[in-house]
Image: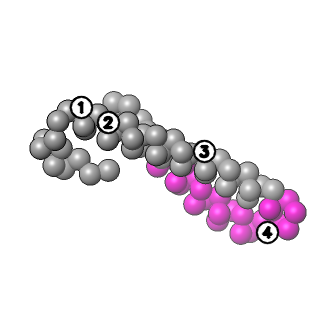
Amino acid sequence: MRIFFSSRIKLEELAFEIKRYKKEKEEQLRYLNEVKQWIKDYTREKKFKEDAFYWSLIVKKEYKSSVAEIEWADE
């Protein structure tokens, strides 16, 4: 999110943009939960356990990043 020039917009507009950003990140968390479940289902069927480890690392990293961004937006 770009807030570098936020001093040039009204506080209401900045608050709106932060809320929009938070909703975007919450949607991303829902999507990541779906991907996480897909990985579990896929590895159960196809047995790509080695690949699943790396896929899960990527999902976990993005999940933590999104959670941190939501926490930031809540401050």
Please state which amino acid type lies under the numbered disc 2.
Answer: Phe
Three-letter code for the amino acid on which mark 4 is drawn:
Phe
- Local crowd size for mark 4, using a 10 Å CA cut-off: few (<14), some (14–19), many (≥20): few
The stretch drawn in magenta includes residue 61: yes
Q: Are marks 1 and 4 in contact (CB under 8 Å)?
A: no
Residue 72 can be seen in this image: no
- Find residue 55 and report its horizontal and vertical position in percent: 65, 63
Q: Position of residue 31 (x, y in %)?
A: 61, 50
Residue at mark 2: 16
2 and 1 marks in contact (CB < 8 Å):
yes
Residue tagged 1: 12
The residue that label 4 is drawn on is 48
User: Label 1 vs label 4: CA separation?
Assistant: 49 Å
Instruction: Please name the residue that numbered disc 3 is placed on.
Output: 30
Classify 67 as above or below 43.
above
Picture quadrant of residue 15: top left
Disc 3 from disc 2: Cα separation: 21 Å
Identify which residue, 18 or 41, lies in the foreground: 18
